[in-house]
Amino acid sequence: MTLAVVATPAFALWGDRVEVFAGQNIAYDSNVFRVSDRRDSQSTIGEPGLSDRSTTTLLGFTASVPVSLQRFEASYTWNRTRYDRFDDLDHNGHFGRLAWLFAYGRTLTGEVGGTHQKGLSTFTNIQGRVPDFVTSKNAFANFAWFATPRWRVHGGVTASQQEHSAPQRLVQDIERASAEAGLSYVTPASNRIGGAVRVERGERPETTIFGGIPFDNAYDQVGVGVIGHWAVTGLSTFDGRVEYIKREYDQLPSRNYSGPTFTASWTYAITGKTTIVTTAMRDIGPLEDINTSFVLVTGASIKPRWQATEKITVQGNLEYSVWDYRGDPLVGTNWENKVRTVGLGVAWKPYRRVLIQGAISREKRTSTLPFNDYTVDLATLEARVGF
């Protein structure tokens, strides 16, 4: 698998504030549909073999325009993906973002914006040949205000919507709205510690019928916790959040949850060229993955990064997580998945606007649910040229 790139002289657009780019990606996936090793591929997806290669063409632009203390950002990427074998997965997708980064003096900063994305859903929880194209919309606004040099107030609101194309996946459609407010004490060294409260409401746009019974996935969630950012030394930084979460569903209270969650991240710069980011977390699982049940995810990751030269960067990834699924009306039982991931990536930037990168990874999932396990090897090679 080879990919040739011819570098062309880059030129600035609008004072170097706008970049137009094109890219090409080649990927190999050993288990596209994330099917269990114990299943026969012929009976599961209709043909022998689970692997495939795909190519993706990328076209887009990024823009960042400062106006006094304000900054306006826009980006759009269009992608066209084609598979060698599974051509029913061929699709065109996109990702767009608009944002206004505002500031008033040195005491008030914030961001208002939105994103729009369309692409092929992961098969992690489908495990079958069911192409599902997901459209996601998101709007957000947040701010940080230094009421005094030592006290920082922050807040934000978010509204999002997710729609699935596959009839079997319409139960995953969700609309969410959340808000957060917090207060932190800031030290002279810019370290901070404080508290925050956030609330969230999620619901399906339409009621789904299962076996003649209406299924309602609406929920309310409240979280209260402590947040902090601390530069332990000049080479070591700690960021953390510990909360007590209470989520209650309008239907099927077996999915309700009350308990602690946390996210802790430690960034350690061994040298000027080598850093290690270690993260530990226990949080509610993403609704983009599955939302008929309640999912509690506990895990840890280690991500070392080495700037080998001015033009070459090497990144590693080790992850382990436990996914605890509760109260799923489709399965009728609780179950647990354990996911292990190891990966390595290399990025080469021979010229300012030319990027060539490749990555390999292996993910292995075991499960207490029959035939819910899988193993997958991934390899990607991508080149991008900007103008």
Image: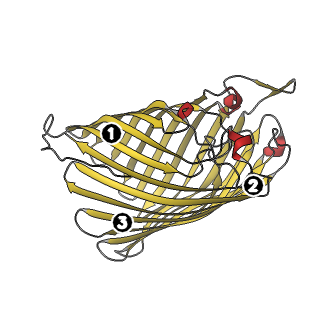
Amino acid on which disc 1 is placed: Leu
Of callouts 1 and 3, the N-terminal one: 1
Residue 101 numbered mark, or none: 1
Residue 253 visible, this orientation:
yes
x%, y% of residue 74?
Answer: 32, 34
Relative side of 281 to 103, left or right: right
Number of residues whose C-alpha sits closer than 10 Å to that of mark 3, classed few (under 14), some (14–19) or many (20 or more): some
Give the residue number, with chain letter if any, for mark 3: 314
Question: Residue 63: x and y, percent?
Answer: 26, 36
**How does the figure colour the protein chain or chains?**
secondary structure
Q: Secondary structure at mark 3?
A: strand
- Residue 159 visible in image: no
Location of residue 277 in the rendering, given as x and y in whole percent from the top left corner? 45, 67
**From this viewpoint, which residue is outermost toward the front?**
48
Distance of label 1 from label 2 (alpha carbons): 51 Å
Answer yes or no: do the residues labelled 1 and 3 have beta carbons within 8 Å? no
Residue 52, numbered circle: none
- The residue type indicated by label 2 comes to Arg
Residue type at the position of mark 3: Val
Which residue is painted at 87% across and 27% down in the image? 211
Label 1: element kind = strand
Q: Nearer the viewer, mark 1 or mark 2?
A: 2
Residue tagged 2: 38
Name the spot of residue 101 as percent of width and height, x first.
33, 39
Considering only order in the chain, which callout, 2 or 3, is on the residue closer to the N terminus? 2
Residue occupying the point 68% across, 31% down: 169
Residue 358 horizontal side relative to residue 319, left or right: left
Where, quadrant-wise, is the C terminus in this rendering?
top left
**Residue at the location (43% across, 52% down)?**
380
Nearest to the observer: residue 32 or residue 305: 32
Q: Is residue 310 above or below residue 27?
A: below
Nearer the observer, 326 or 235: 326
